[in-house]
Structures are given as structure tokens and as C-alpha cells.
């Protein structure tokens, strides 16, 4: 799908001026919440630590929390890095009970959950359901059994954010976004790059990056430098 979008197969995000659609900002691009692990190994020989409260932020980084980036991103000559969680509609406990330092005081207990906040956000801006967008895209919507919300007493159509997580699980085994989530994320990201004349999308074919992401993070050998000019 990404390859098709890159060569012009962009049907829904086609603005003359760049902007961030609500379907992207308040639903599809929040798929990353479903990929967060409960615990991360930051240093070899140390114990893995939970996202919260250990990695809360808002303070100097303690020595025990300094990150060996080769444990988070694959690097040549190192063991494979920790993988993100598969997308299946579930979130780890650390995100269901967010620290007060992030949420502030919550009179409603459920608002300490990032899942509730994501759902409230979509409701607040009036996002369409996942099923309605699937129909609009010409895709077969997930069945009620595939979504799996009936057991919780929900009989309506599915909020877009949750639909995209369940679609990824049902259509790809949780390894990547499905046709609705992938189309929204892919079209917007490629479209924004295309609309920005200074982006890498418009670099000459001869341009090569000077470093990979893990090289920038770790300082590993970056090889010869390259520039757009």
C-alpha cells in the first residue's frame, strides 16, 4: 500500500494546503498506544522496567534509566532489539492507569486510562465509526464478532480508534495496520511530505542519507557524509 501511495494512489487526502485530518490525529495515528510494551530493558544486565512510573519523564534521567539504543532499535552486529507489541486492541496496564503526573487530578477515575481518553477524543470531535469509513473506502467492515465489543454490552458501530486496532489484529495478525488504518496513515504522511517542498520526498534521486536512525542515536560508525547538494 505504501508503494502504491508513493506513486500517486492517494484517493482521500488530497488538499491544496497541508493540514492534519481529525481521522488521522485523533484515531488512526494513535495506533501506537497499542504497541507500547509494559516493560523495557534499557541496559544489558539490568532488570526491565515498567513504562510508568519508572519512565515518567519530567525530571533528569537517572543513570539506571539511560538507554542503550541498540536494545530498542536493530543495529548491525547486535542482537535483535525489543519488539513493539502486536496491534490487537489491548493496552498494557501502565496505560490504563496513568500517573497523576501525566493526567493531573481526575475526578472521574476512568479518565486515568489513555484508552478512555482516546475514545472520548474521537467522540468529542465527531469522528465517524470505523465501519462507516470501511464502507466509504469500499472495504468489508469487520463483523461484530471480529470487533468483539458485544461482550462488553456495546451494540453500536465501533469508534474509529478502536476499530483500527481490531482491524490490524483481524486482517494482519497485529503485525501492521489494516486497509483502513493503513490507508489513513499512509495517505496523510505521504501527502504531507509531498506538500512540503523542503521534505525528503523532493530530494534528488542521487541523495543518500548520511546515517540511519540507530546510528544517529548511538554514534555508531556513520560512514561518509552525504548532503542534498
Image (cartoon, grey):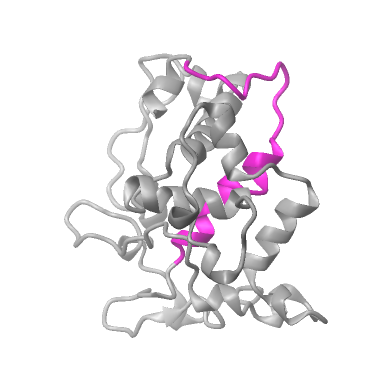
Determine if residue 153 is in view: yes
Nearer-the-camera pick, 200 or 155: 155
Image coords of residue 26 (percent x, y)? 67, 48
| Residue 95 at x, y percent in the picture | 57, 73
- The quarter holding residue 88 reads bottom left
Magenta region, residue range: 9-36
Measuring 47% from the left and 48% from the top, which residue is drawn there? Answer: 143
Q: Is residue 14 magenta?
A: yes
Position of 119 with respect to 213 (left or right) is right
List the single residue furthest toward the right: 107
> x, y percentage for residue 52?
55, 79
Residue at 62 percent across and 24 percent down: it is 13
Which image quarter: residue 21? top right
Q: Is residue 3 a member of the stretch shown in magenta?
A: no
Residue at point 53% right, 60% down?
Answer: 33
Q: Please, is residue 19 above or below residue 92 in the view? A: above
Front in this rendered view, residue 42 or 96: 96
Residue reaching furthest bottom? Answer: 47
Q: Nearer the viewer, residue 187 or 101?
A: 187
Identify whether 228 is placed above or below 128. above
The quadrant where residue 193 appears? top right
Residue 61 seen in the figure? no
Residue extending farthest to the left is 77
Mark count: 0
Residue 194 lies, with reference to residue 162, above or below; the image says above
Identity of the residue drawn at 33% across and 50% down: 175
83 sits left or right of 13 in the view? left
Q: Position of residue 186 (x, y in %)?
A: 50, 32
Q: Is residue 165 left or right of residue 69?
A: right
Q: Classify the position of the N terminus by image quarter.
A: top left
Amino acid at each position: 500500500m505504501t508503494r502504491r501511495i508513493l506513486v500517486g494512489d492517494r484517493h482521500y487526502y488530497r488538499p491544496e494546503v497541508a493540514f492534519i485530518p481529525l481521522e488521522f490525529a485523533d484515531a488512526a495515528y494513535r495506533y501506537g498506544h497499542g504497541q507500547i510494551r509494559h516493560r523495557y530493558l534499557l541496559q544489558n544486565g539490568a532488570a526491565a522496567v515498567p513504562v510508568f512510573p519508572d519512565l515518567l519523564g519530567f525530571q533528569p534521567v537517572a543513570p539506571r534509566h539511560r538507554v542503550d539504543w541498540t536494545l530498542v532499535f536493530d543495529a548491525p552486529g547486535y542482537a535483535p532489539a525489543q519488539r513493539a507489541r502486536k496491534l490487537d486492541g489491548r493496552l498494557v496496564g501502565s496505560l490504563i492507569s496513568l500517573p497523576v503526573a501525566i493526567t493531573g487530578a481526575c475526578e472521574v477515575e476512568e479518565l486515568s486510562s489513555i484508552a478512555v481518553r482516546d475514545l472520548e477524543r474521537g467522540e468529542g470531535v465527531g469522528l465517524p465509526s470505523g465501519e462507516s469509513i470501511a464502507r466509504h473506502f469500499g472495504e468489508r467492515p469487520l463483523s461484530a464478532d471480529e470487533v468483539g465489543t458485544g461482550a462488553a454490552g456495546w451494540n453500536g458501530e465501533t469508534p474509529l480508534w478502536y476499530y483500527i486496532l481490531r482491524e490490524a489484529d483481524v486482517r494482519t495478525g497485529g503485525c501492521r495496520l489494516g486497509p483502513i488504518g493503513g490507508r489513513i496513515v499512509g495517505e496523510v504522511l505521504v501527502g504531507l511530505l509531498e506538500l512540503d517542498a523542503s521534505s525528503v520526498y523532493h530530494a534528488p534521486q542521487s541523495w543518500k542519507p548520511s546515517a540511519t536512525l540507530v546510528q544517529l542515536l548511538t554514534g555508531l560508525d556513520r560512514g561518509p557524509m552525504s548532503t542534498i547538494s
